[in-house]
Image (cartoon, rainbow, N blue to C red):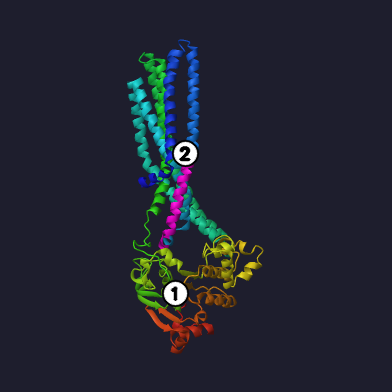
């Protein structure tokens, strides 16, 4: 993990090296000052050497001006470097998230992922800036002042080292509790962020049910847990910080008292004591700096552990070593003895399932919930990998072609249309980001949405709100269809694309769908059987697999499950025989 963390410094090595050089200069200035001060007290003042006093003042001023310049570079460019490392990490994390399969997002809350992208990386950024600098500068000052202290008075330096040893023992004994406390705080912060994201996303549902108080109470549970975890963390940090600073202050008192006795018994001069005290102050400074740094280290490394945990996830759905682009797709689809479950220890959704779909044909899937209709729509574009068996496009296994080329050749329209916050133009353009305005308009016309768009004051530049809240269900569906028209894939999957619409809107959108499906291999998952009457083949599924297949007229004549369900829909009731087979 530390090797991975260190790798982010490589692109910024020039800033990093200059930062360390500046830290070295700052340390040198701090170490030189006490030596000159000793000469000032023991030599220049007793001998009334005003010339050397003025030289001393000039040298110190020059040194401090250099120190100011170095500190400016450290504070400015060091933070710039930290922000650039944060940018690199966030870019890598976001890119990696794009490659993770649906299963990862099934198991992880959006709020927690957002917390990794923001709060965790902010802490990592601070650590990236201050970490090496604090360690390097503190090490220089510790080693330098340690050597100089022994040169001045070995006995007093030995006493100092004993006090420092006590301080280090206390620090190490408290570190584990502080680390665990802040890890728990991070977990609770992720939970509260997830709660906020979930509640805001569902604010319309909350208000429609008048459940504002319920949501507030539910949020307060997470809020209280977060508050209490922060309280525990800062209690541990308070014990840790107060104890270390008390021992550090006590160390200074010990040196003053014992040093005063050494001067009284003429074992050292007053100037040597002043020099020793200044070096002691310098020695304590990096000790305190390192003590304070441990808090930042805990937060930063806790954040990086969480980010690294995601970066270290190897996507189980990815291109194989010999994967080739899928080209010149005709559209035939073959499911060969497919077995699939969403969890390895759960019941199979599909078991030894086989299905052939001819190119440029329309196939509809009908059946009760849970028999695998939507699953089929998700394993064809390889959103999930099957446990056994294979899926082939034009005779090529989906595992032998690149994911990008596979999914570029498949267009999907779902019941729950997702639209990004932005303009109508942006959302249609998502089907083909390189398309021009003429192609966008043509796609909108094909989806029967152009006239509505032009009726808006800003036309294609009209904002649709988050997830398209300013649009009706039918308008959102038409935008999704326009998006697929612009993509122009040879394979089309429609997952209950009209089931939530009223009859009039459904009829209008059905015309757009039929136009979209023309000359494409189309898989339709249908709730309303009226929408699939023109399908080339209809597959009726049950828990045992395929129970009926054929076109609408053939299945009606067979007077089986499909026929009974079809007539039941139009009569307004569902017979007892199939009452549990709600499509």
Quarter of the figure with residue 399: bottom left
Quarter of the figure with residue 150: top left
The residue tagged with tag 1: helix, strand or loop? loop
Relative horizontal placement of residue 468, taking residue 8 as reference (left or right): right
The residue tagged with tag 2: helix, strand or loop? helix
Residue at left 48%, top 38%?
77
Main secondary-structure element of the magenta-colored stretch: helix
98 inside magenta stretch: yes
Segment tinted magenta in the rendering: 78-104
Q: Which residue is mark 1?
A: 369
Q: Which residue is mark 2?
A: 78
Quarter of the figure with residue 310: bottom left
x and y, in percent, of residue 472 in the image: 59, 69
321 inside magenta stretch: no
- Return the residue found at the far front: 328
x and y, in percent, of residue 548 in the image: 41, 83
């Amino acid at each position: 993990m530390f090797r991975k963390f260190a790798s982010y410094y490589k692109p910024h090595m020039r800033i990093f090296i200059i930062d360390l050089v500046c830290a070295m200069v700052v340390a040198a200035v701090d170490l030189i000052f006490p030596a000159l001060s000793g000469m000032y007290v023991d030599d220049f003042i007793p001998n009334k050497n005003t010339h050397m006093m003025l030289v001393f003042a000039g040298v110190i001023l020059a040194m401090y001006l250099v120190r100011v310049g170095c500190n400016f570079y450290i504070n400015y460019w060091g933070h710039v470097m930290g922000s650039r490392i944060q940018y690199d990490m966030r870019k890598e994390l976001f890119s990696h998230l794009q490659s993770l399969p649906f299963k990862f997002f099934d198991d992880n809350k959006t709020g927690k992922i957002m917390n990794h992208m923001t709060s965790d990386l902010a802490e990592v950024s601070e650590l990236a800036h201050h970490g090496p600098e604090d360690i390097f500068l503190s090490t220089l000052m510790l080693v330098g002042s340690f050597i100089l202290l022994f040169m001045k008075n070995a006995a007093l330096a030995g006493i100092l080292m004993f006090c420092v040893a006590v301080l280090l023992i206390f620090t190490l004994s408290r570190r584990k509790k502080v680390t665990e406390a802040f890890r728990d705080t991070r977990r609770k912060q992720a939970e509260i962020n997830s709660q906020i994201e979930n509640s805001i996303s569902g604010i319309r549902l909350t208000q429609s049910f008048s459940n504002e108080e319920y949501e507030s109470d539910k949020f307060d549970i997470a809020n209280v847990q977060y508050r209490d975890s922060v309280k525990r963390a800062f209690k541990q940090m308070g014990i840790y910080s107060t104890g270390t600073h008390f021992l550090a202050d006590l160390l200074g008192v010990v040196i003053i008292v014992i040093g005063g006795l050494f001067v009284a018994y003429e074992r050292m001069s007053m100037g040597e004591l002043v020099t020793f005290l200044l070096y002691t102050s310098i020695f304590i400074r990096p000790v305190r700096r390192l003590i304070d740094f441990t808090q930042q280290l805990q937060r930063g490394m806790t954040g990086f552990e969480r980010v690294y945990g995601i970066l270290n996830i190897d996507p189980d759905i990815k291109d194989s070593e010999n994967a080739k682009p899928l080209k010149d797709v005709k559209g035939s689809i073959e499911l060969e003895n497919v077995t699939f479950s969403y969890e390895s220890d759960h019941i199979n959704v599909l078991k030894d399932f086989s299905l052939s779909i001819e190119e440029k044909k329309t196939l509809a899937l009908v059946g009760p919930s849970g028999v695998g209709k939507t699953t089929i729509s998700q394993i064809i574009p390889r959103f999930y990998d099957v446990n056994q068996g294979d899926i082939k496009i034009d005779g090529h296994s989906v595992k032998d072609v690149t994911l990008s080329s596979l999914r570029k050749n498949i267009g999907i329209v779902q019941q729950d249309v997702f639209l990004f916050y932005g303009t109508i133009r942006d959302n249609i353009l998502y089907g083909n980001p390189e398309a021009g305005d003429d192609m966008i308009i043509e796609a909108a016309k094909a989806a029967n949405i152009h006239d509505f768009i032009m009726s808006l004051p800003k036309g294609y530049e009209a904002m649709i709100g988050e997830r398209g809240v300013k649009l009706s269900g039918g308008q959102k569906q038409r935008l999704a269809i326009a998006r697929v028209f612009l993509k122009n894939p040879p394979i089309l999957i429609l997952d209950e694309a009209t089931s939530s619409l009223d009859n009039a809107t459904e009829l209008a959108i059905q015309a757009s769908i039929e136009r979209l499906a023309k000359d494409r291999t189309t898989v339709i998952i249908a709730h309303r059987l009226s929408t699939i009457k023109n399908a080339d083949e209809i597959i009726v599924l049950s828990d045992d697999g395929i129970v009926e297949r054929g076109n609408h007229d053939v299945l009606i004549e067979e007077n089986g499950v499909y026929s009974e369900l079809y007539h039941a829909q139009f009569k307004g009731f569902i017979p007892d025989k199939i009452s549990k087979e709600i499509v």
